[in-house]
Image (cartoon, rainbow, N blue to C red):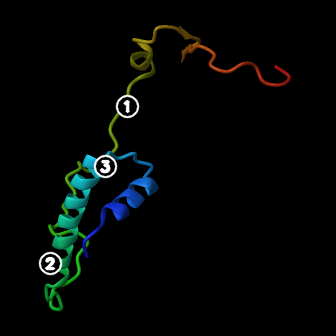
Amino acid sequence: MALSDEEVRHVALLARLDLSAEQVTRFREDLNSILGHIDDIQQLDLADVEPTAHPLDVVNVTRPDEPRPGLSHEVALMNAPEQQDGAFVIPRIVGPGEGA
């Protein structure tokens, strides 16, 4: 199935793209090439191929989730630009609410 220039313009319109005539021609050629590859894949006999979600075995490479000691209160506040009563002081980012 080959796409026409008009079909490429329609797809571009759906994608909210403004393509020049040169781009329409280039994308038509590219899309037709992609569709040709899809047709080739559809011709393959895959009856004996087991469906997979991923072609390679997926291996979890993260470290074990084991509890470790966290920062002490003093170390956590050590580089704070401003602190008060053992807590970070941050600038107000919203105005006071009702009743405040």
Q: CA separation, marks 3 and 1?
A: 14 Å
> How far across and down, in percent of the image, does residue 73 sit?
45, 21
Residue type at the position of mark 2: Asp
Front residue (pair 56, 59): 56
* Residue type highlighted by circle 3: Asp
Instruction: Tell me which amino acid carries mark 1.
Output: Gly
Residue 80 shown left or right of residue 56 in the figure:
right
What's the mark number on residue 57?
Answer: none
Left or right: 22 with respect to 83?
left
Q: Residue at x 32, y 45 (%)?
A: 20
- On the image, which quarter does residue 56 sit in? bottom left
Which type of secondary structure does the marked residue at label 3 adopt?
Answer: loop
Sooner in the amino-acid sequence: mark 3 or mark 2: 2
Q: Nearer the viewer, residue 60 or 41?
A: 41
Q: Residues within 10 Å of mark 2 (few under 14, many from 20)?
A: few
- Mark 3–mark 1 contact, CB under 8 Å? no
Image quadrant in which you'd find residue 1: bottom left
Q: Which residue is mark 3?
A: 65
Residue at the image position 23 percent from the left and 50 percent from the top: 62
- From the viewer's perspective, tell me whether residue 84 is left or right of residue 97: left
The residue that disc 2 covers is: 40
The label nearer to you, 2 versus 1, is 2
The secondary element bearing badge 2 is classed as helix
Residue for point 18% across, 72% down: 36
Q: Is residue 30 above or below residue 92?
A: below
Mark 2 touches mark 1? (CB < 8 Å)? no
Q: Nearer the viewer, residue 67 or 78?
A: 78
The residue sitting at 20% across, 73% down in the picture is 38
Against 29, residue 86 (above or below) is above
- Which residue is label 1 attached to? 70
Front disc: 3 or 2: 2
Front residue of this view, candidates 98 and 84:
98
